[in-house]
Every structure is written in C-alpha cells, then in structure tokens.
Image (cartoon, rainbow, N blue to C red):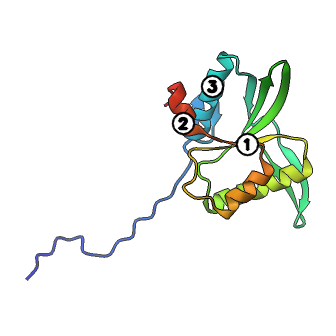
Amino acid sequence: MTEKLGYEKNRTVHYEWRNVPTKFMGIEFKSKLEARWARYLEAIRKLGVIVSWKYEPKRFDCGLIYNKRRFYTPDFWVVEKEGLHKYVVWHEVKASGSGKDFQKAVSRLRWFKKAYPEELIVLVLPNAPKRENVHMMHAKKYVERIAYCNALFRRHGIK
C-alpha cells in the first residue's frame, strides 16, 4: 500500500513570460534587456564610440499591408560615428532569435525596410543561436548587422 501525499493530481504549470518594465536614467524601458542595452549604449557614448542615443523616438508608417495600416517603432535611435562621418542606425532589441514573437518581429523589419530602404537597422539578440532557423535567415536580409549583447554586457561589466 502506498501512502498518499496529497499532491498526486496531475498538475500543469503554465509559464507566462512577460517583459518587466525597468527604469534607467529616468526612462521607463519595456524590458530589462532594453534597459541593459541602454546602459551599454550610455557606456560606449561616454567612451566616445557613439555620439548619442534615444529610446523609441519615432514611429514609422509602413503603409497598407494586407489592407491594414502598419506601423513600426524601433527600440533605439543611435548616432554612430566612423572616422569623421556620423550616421543614424536603428537598434531593435529582441529577447530571442526564434519563436512566434521573433517571426512577427521579422515581418515588421520587412515592412520597415520596404517602406524605408535607406534606413539602417541593427538587430540585438542576447546570444548567437545554436543553429540558424528560417526566421533568422530572413531577418539577416533586412538588417545591417546582428549584435549579440550578452558578450558585450560581460565585457563592459553591465548587469
């Protein structure tokens, strides 16, 4: 005879991943990852690597897509410099390089690039994927480069 412990029922645990709003420099960011990226941008601004940055300063109208008006708001506006030249780059921060959320993000990048082909986009991901999925291959078509932020955070001591 087995002793009943009271928790024998089959229970399903549902995890719901949510962004945790986080403040940095008086700005409320939608997620901890975005706040950490802002800390990184501020650190490299102080080092003179970039000129300036802003959080979600502009909303772009990407036009009618599937009979619906579509908009895109990049996470960061960054003025980078290379030698004597300065140029604007938009940074899009994503917590993962796979899944439905990433698939939607790639669609928004496609709409944005189609409507504004001259704009430069950097995709910011925590880590390089172990293997490349089809959405990552599509994303590479629309971005200037991909930055893997966890290594950059470690290098600059950002928690």
* Figure check: 109 above or below 4: above
Given residues 129 and 1, the one toward you in this image is 129
Q: Which residue is mark 2?
A: 151
The residue most toward the left is 1
Dot 2: what SS?
helix
**For the N terminus, which image quadrant?**
bottom left
Q: Which residue is mark 1?
A: 145
Given residues 45 and 2, the one toward you in this image is 45
The residue at the point 62 percent across, 54 percent down is: 97
Dot 3: what SS?
loop
Mark 2 or 3: in front is 2
The residue at the point 49 percent across, 31 percent down is: 159
Q: Which residue is mark 3?
A: 26
Circle 1 packing at 10 Å, graded few (<14), some (14-19), many (20+), is some
Q: CA distance from mark 3 to mark 1?
A: 29 Å
Give, as a three-letter code, the residue at label 2.
Answer: Ala
* Figure check: 150 above or below 138: above
Dot 1: what SS?
strand
Q: Are marks 3 and 1 in contact (CB under 8 Å)?
A: no
In x, y percent, where is residue 69?
Answer: 88, 58
In x, y percent, where is residue 45?
Answer: 68, 20
Of mark 2 and mark 1, the one earlier in the sequence is: 1
The residue at the point 54 percent across, 32 percent down is: 153
Circle 2 packing at 10 Å, graded few (<14), some (14-19), many (20+), is some
Q: CA distance from mark 2 to mark 3?
A: 26 Å
Q: CA distance from mark 2 to mark 1?
A: 16 Å
